Each structure stands twice: as C-alpha cells, then as structure tokens.
Amino acid sequence: MSDSLQAKHGRIELVLGNIVEQAVDAIVNAANTKLAGGGGVDGAIHRAAGPKLLEECLRLPADEEGRRCPTGDVRVTGAGNLPARYVIHAVGPVYNERYADKARRQLREVHERALAAAAAKGCRSVAFPAISTGAYRFPLGEAAPIALAAAQEHLRQATSVQLVRFVLFSPPQLEVFRAALKALAGPEGV
Ligand code: ADP
C-alpha cells in the first residue's frame, strides 16, 4: 500500500485528517519558540486541548524574551482534553531561501528530537503534522522527504515507537507525502 512503509522497528503511515483527532500516544505540535499558542495547527491543538495545555506550556521556563524552546528543539507536555497522552511541541525553522541548508538541517533535527522525546516517554504511536510548511513557508516538496527520512532513521534503531503517522491536512499535501514515501521505499517499493 502506498500510504505505509514498514521499517525495521515500526511503520510510517500517511493519513488525510486533523491532528487533534488522532488517538495516538503523542501528537506533535508545530509550535513557535514562545509555546504560547498561535495560528494554524498550533491554534487548533490548543483549542481542542483546552486551557490546561496553555497553562502547562506557560509553566515551562522561559528566557528574558519569553522563549521557551529554541528553533529545532522540542518540549513535552500533557495533552489536556485531546485523545493523545502527550503533546510534543516542536519548533520548526522559518524557511528563508538564503539559509535553506540551515532550515533543512533544523527541520531534520526537530523531527529527530520529537521522535527521541516520544521514545523517552515510552510512546508507541506518534502523529506529526507537516511541520514548518504553513506559516513558516518551508516548501512542502522539500519538507516531506526530510520528515519521512527522519522517521525511517528513527525506526531503524531500537525504540518504543512502532507507528509514526503523518497527518496531512489536504489531498494535495497527502499526494506530496505519498510521492516522497514512494521515493524513500526505493525501487522495490514496500
Ligand atoms: P508552521 O508555522 O510550522 O508552518 P502551520 O500550523 O502554519 O505551522 O502549518 C503546518 C502545517 O500544518 C501546514 O501544512 C498546515 O496545512 C497543517 N495543518 C493546519 N492545521 C492542521 C490540523 N488541524 N491537522 C493537521 N495539519 C494541520
């Protein structure tokens, strides 16, 4: 099936849907450095989770400018009223063509760290949105292979994570991820 790829320790899956509805151990939020909520998927997650999520975020330590998580890094909280147990707040890079290499590196890193954080909590299933591809303008066609390769790499090691689900918000987005997953699977396909 084109929407799923089996790796050594777990499976990568693509679905069309809304991240807030995913009944997985952890959902990943495309957050900003302040972790104080925002638009896009961040806003949707906070609305669905209820005020407890924001309260928990605001209790995390902040620097003088109110930043609670640097770009490329993650913080873990509970999930309020969501079906998930944890929210992994992941701060992806804002895409800038002049520093595209740095943005690619940070996008890869933020996926690796989100998966490592999920594994540290013993999560078996994790759902990701397409981090940085909305307001942060990372081209989807470039972001998809980076996100999927990070998931594949994580699942090559021993990990509690058995399912990495990418939740795409529109059919065209899903198509881009499908093509990238097919390329990742190689000529034999899986
Ligand atoms: P960023 O600031 O990291 O770019 P955005 O929230 O603007 O984050 O967008 C990230 C991606 O999440 C976009 O591709 C957008 O289409 C998608 N998205 C928005 N809302 C949801 C949702 N409820 N579930 C899944 N994906 C979503």
Image: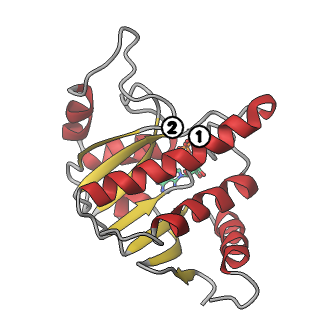
Residue drawn at point x = 32 percent, y = 57 percent: 118
- On the picture, is 132 further left or further right than 78? right
Tell me how many marks there are: 2
Check the image and report above or below for 153 versus 90: below
Q: Which three-letter amino acid code belongs to the residue tagged 1?
A: Gln
The C terminus: image quadrant: bottom right
- On the picture, is 127 further left or further right than 26? right
Check the image and report above or below for 78 versus 100: below
The residue identified by callout 1 is: 106
The local secondary structure at tag 2 comes to: loop
Indicate the position of residue 136 as horizontal and vertical percent values. 63, 37
Q: Which three-letter amino acid code belongs to the residue tagged 2?
A: Gly
For the rendered model, the colour scheme is secondary structure
Residue drawn at point x = 35 percent, y = 14 percent: 63
Residue drawn at point x = 65 percent, y = 74 percent: 181
Between 126 and 41, the one lying in front of the other is 126
Quadrant hosting residue 162:
bottom left
CA distance separating discs 2 and 1: 5 Å
Q: Earlier in the sequence, mark 2 or mark 1?
A: 2
Q: Which mark is residue 129?
A: none
Residue at the limit of the structure toward the right, as seen here: 98
CB at mark 2 closer than 8 A to ligand 1? no
Check the image and report above or below for 5 versus 104: below
Between 149 and 182, the one lying in front of the other is 149
The residue identified by callout 2 is: 72
